[in-house]
Image: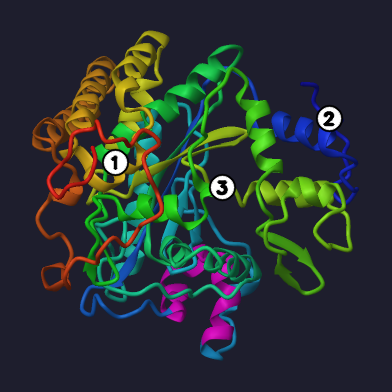
Amino acid sequence: MAAPALELDPAAPVPDRAAAAAYVASVCFKHGPPRLLGAELEWLVRSAWRPADPVDPAQLLRVLGPHAPGTLRSSVPTVTGAPPPPQAARAPEPLPSGSDVTVEPGGQVEIATPPVASLSELVSAVSADTAAIRERLATEGLTLVDRAADPLRPPRRLLRVPRYAAMEAAFDRVGPHGRTMMCSTSAVQLCVDAGEGTAVADRWRALHEIGPALVGMFANSPAVHGHRTGWKSSRMAAWLSLDPERTRPPRGLGDDPAVEWAERALATSLLCVRRHGHWNAPPAVTFGDWIDGHGGLDVAPTWDDLDYHLTTLFPPVRPHGHVEIRYVDQQPGGEWAVPLAVITALLADPRTLDAAREAAAPVADRWVAAARHGLADPALQRAAARLVDLAHRALATTDPALATLVGEVAERRVLRGRCPADDPTVEPGEGELGPAVENPYPSPRDPDDHPDHPALPGGDPA
């Protein structure tokens, strides 16, 4: 598929679907040798003394200081009535190792590293910048939560910006899970180069195929909003439920992921239309419909609108020039390094990648089972054990310190069929959670659920 001209005017209208598809394919999958890594890590924030209290955005603005993003700065006057602090006029400063700080709608703090050339550099950067964030938060008694979903507090949107208001309105039409995702969850995301030649499709398929086993391995969100949910990754369950066309894994993985992604992007409903002082979009109108003049919109979409639309798609693996792996729950303590190390090691060479795909093949579509059962599902546990062994072997020759950490987690959890969600209470107040909510995520289903699958405890299909 030919790339569009580089001199495209962002304000110019998109002429037709074919031009839009060509553009999406070219900007989302940029070919080249896989050289760089990056990470985006987000954490829920709570008071060390009053963990069930909501986050005060003005307090968060103070502690982040020169690193505070504009979305938080612009939200504080709306929420508190106070004038913005002096630093509001300045561009945010990166953290010591170069990470940018963002704040998610519910007050989660996120760091995004610059691209680096090696896993050891990435872990060093995240370690330094996480320590800087923890130090700043501690000045006012705030801490980072060791779970990937808020076990105590209801979802409460702090950021008063048009994008998040439009997202909330769109997700509310589907159900309650959009607010949970936006305000009550956190993740570890790894960013990798797409690769070159035929390796692009292989890497793309592999990152999806190993996904369910890794979701189960790192599931760390057994409770939300004061109740246990019956899911090991309530975060992933929320993602799978909140807007399936926007968040589901691909239904098939073909030989040309760029073309397939472009088709999906144009067939996905609009989340935001940034016009006339509001950002709400008409329901059930896709970007392709907008190009074709359908949906009642009185303006044509521009290339800038298409770029923005791509930022409103949230599948477990997202192409963004590079590839974002988005399906891993945030981990307790410093264990965020384990999923970064495991995924990087599995991608390190073609032989390891082939072995990883073979190990994951029996559970490659088991996203829902992984979120619900973690590694209590025997098939997922077998796949996860094989994957962590492959990663450990690869790391033993390149990064012995990380190999030791991965081996320790494998021994303590993976080989025992456990995930972080199975660990004893790690957050204040978790011991006083209410009774389990009956079937809080009713919509997602395994694509391969059928009566022949063995039942796990509780009667759910494996």
The correct choice, above or below, for 305 with respect to 226 in the image is above
Residue 408 x %, y %:
13, 33
Q: For this rendering, which residue is in front, 437 or 118? A: 437
Residue at the disc numbered 3: 245
The amino acid on which the numbered mark 1 sits, given as a three-letter code, is Ala
Mark 2 → mark 1, Cα distance in angstroms: 41 Å
The answer to whether any part of residue 129 appears in the image is no
Residue at the disc numbered 2: 4
Mark 2 secondary-structure assignment? loop
Near mark 2 (Cα within 10 A), the count class, few <14, some 14-19 or many ≥20, is: some
Q: Earlier in the sequence, mark 3 or mark 1?
A: 3
| Dot 3 and dot 1 residues touching (CB under 8 Å) | no
Residue 399 x %, y %:
27, 23
Residue 148 x %, y %:
31, 55
Q: Earlier in the sequence, mark 2 or mark 1?
A: 2
Name the colouring of the figure: rainbow
Please state if 27 lies on the left or on the right of 236 as rendered: right
Q: Residue at x 77, y 52 (%)?
A: 305
Q: Residue at x 15, y 28 (%)?
A: 407
Please state if 443 lies on the left or on the right of 275 as rendered: left
Q: Which residues are magenta?
A: 57-79
Mark 3 secondary-structure assignment? helix
Residue lying farthest bottom? Answer: 81
Q: Can you tell which of label 3 and label 2 is closer to the viewer?
A: 3
Residue at the disc numbered 1: 369
The amino acid on which the numbered mark 2 sits, given as a three-letter code, is Pro
Q: Can you tell which of label 2 and label 1 is closer to the viewer?
A: 1
Q: For this rendering, which residue is in front, 237 or 25? A: 237
In which quadrant will I find the C terminus?
Answer: top left
